[in-house]
Amino acid sequence: MLPELHLTPAVVAVILGMSAVTYITKAGGLWLLSRIEVPEYAEAGLAVLPGAIIVSIVGPELARAGPPEWGAGAVALLVAWRTENVLLALVSGVAAVLLFRGV
């Protein structure tokens, strides 16, 4: 049985505060990068950063997983390779793991 969730004013304030800090950090970074000249090598590194973050999160999970997860990883890899769309690859991988676990 799942515990009940109590949404108190303090919890809402913490969530809103964390959201504001996250937005300010991202907006500030974009504002700063629009004001300075970024070298090509830094732009290339920033371009591949989302994929690297995803691999660093998913990689260890795949190492501990089983055949359904490995198959879903292969599906996500194939979709990413063919479409070059990280979001589509993630959605495909999640759908595949759900499908493979159900089989």
Image (spheres, helix red, strand yellow):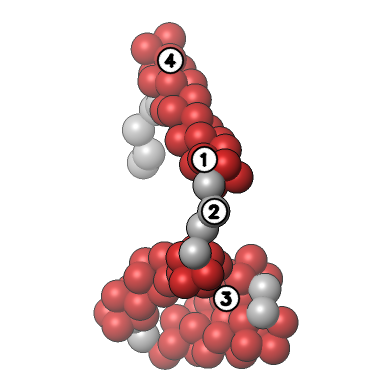
Which of pointers 2 and 1 lies earlier in the amino acid sequence? 1
**Which label lies toward us, 3 or 1?**
1
The residues bearing labels 2 and 1 have C-alpha atoms spaced at a distance of 10 Å
Residue 61 placement: quadrant? bottom left
Query: Dot 2: few (<14), some (14–19), or many (≥20) neighbours within 10 Å?
Result: few
| Residue underneath mark 1 | 32
Amino acid type for the residue under numbered disc 1: Leu
* Viewer-nearest residue: 81 or 5: 81
| Residue underneath mark 3 | 93
Which of pointers 2 and 4 lies earlier in the amino acid sequence? 4
Q: Residue at x 39, y 20 (%)?
A: 14
In the rendered image, residue 73, in percent from the top left (x then y), is placed at 49, 83
The residues bearing labels 2 and 3 have C-alpha atoms spaced at a distance of 37 Å
Which of pointers 2 and 3 lies earlier in the amino acid sequence? 2
Q: Which residue is drawn at 67% across and 73% down?
A: 85
Mark 1 secondary-structure assignment: helix
Q: Can residue 44 be seen in this view?
A: yes
Amino acid type for the residue under numbered disc 4: Ala
